[in-house]
Image (spheres, rainbow, N blue to C red):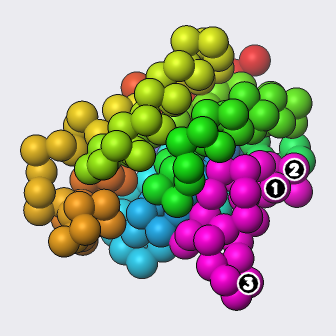
Amino acid sequence: MGRLLVSSLVVVLCCAPAGGAAAAKRRPQQRVTIFSDSVGASLNWDSTARRIVEHGNRVLFELRPCGRLVQIGCLSTNPPPSVLGTVRALGRRIGPTVVVFIGYNDAPITYRHGLPTVLKAMRKRGVRHVLWLTLRAVNRQYVDINHAIYAAARKWSPILTVLDWNHYSASHRTWYASDGIHMTGVGALAFATYLHRSLRRLGLTGPLPAH
């Protein structure tokens, strides 16, 4: 009985510090900032979709209806700031990983010229990974913007990765409302799952990497 008690105490004394050390070394989750207009704002009203994206990450949602890339938003009253304006306002708080899903309210020529300006502003503030989603190309305007995104990716690799949401979602009509752009509840879940899987595939979700 005495030997059993001593053995038990040894186990407790040996293991307790190890558990404490493991807890002390627990690393924080990676940070992600997501920019979008009213299309990506489905993550604001669908709590399940939002939780999918947040799993394993500390997420800052910058989802602004009528938002634009480098110009203030298209609302006549209290227009939202542009992605560029928000990047500058956030500074280093933006974090190392950014997701951009915006362009439905932009003119292609303005978007194309604004892309490098936004990317330079992000890089200056410590962003190391930008995941840029293509638009659902239901008209020529969005086709041209997608071309601009791919053109930028050729110049900004490896910081910029294109996620081809247009191709991925093309055959799924039930994911979209009647306008073919804004998402239904099913579409919001599909979008959140696609985005989270993309982050995970690139190693941009979960605990911060050990240095």
Cα–Cα span, label 1 and label 3: 15 Å
**Magenta part, dominant SS:** loop
Residue type, label 2: Arg
Q: Name the residue under label 2.
A: 88
Pointer 3 or 2: first along the chain:
3
Image check: 50 left or right of 99? Answer: left
In this rendering, the answer to whether 56 lies above or below 180 is above
Q: Where is residue 207 in the image (x, y as percent from the top left)?
A: 60, 36
- Taking depth in this image into account, of 63 and 128 the one nearest to the observer is 63
Q: Mark 1 points at which residue?
A: 85
- Residue at (66%, 68%) from the top-left corner? 73
Residue type, label 3: Asn
- Any part of residue 68 in sight: yes
Residue type, label 1: Gly
Q: What element carries label 2?
A: helix
Q: What element carries label 3?
A: loop
- Any part of residue 165 in sight: no
- Residue at (46%, 56%) from the top-left corner? 104
Pointer 1 or 3: first along the chain:
3
Segment colored magenta: 64-90
Q: Where is residue 100 in the image (x, y as percent from the top left)?
A: 56, 44
Q: Which of marks 3 and 2 is in front?
A: 3
Q: Position of residue 81 (x, y in %)?
A: 75, 65
Image check: 104 left or right of 171? Answer: right
Q: Mark 3 points at which residue?
A: 78
The reply to whether the C-beta atoms of the residues labelled 1 and 2 are less than 8 Å apart is yes
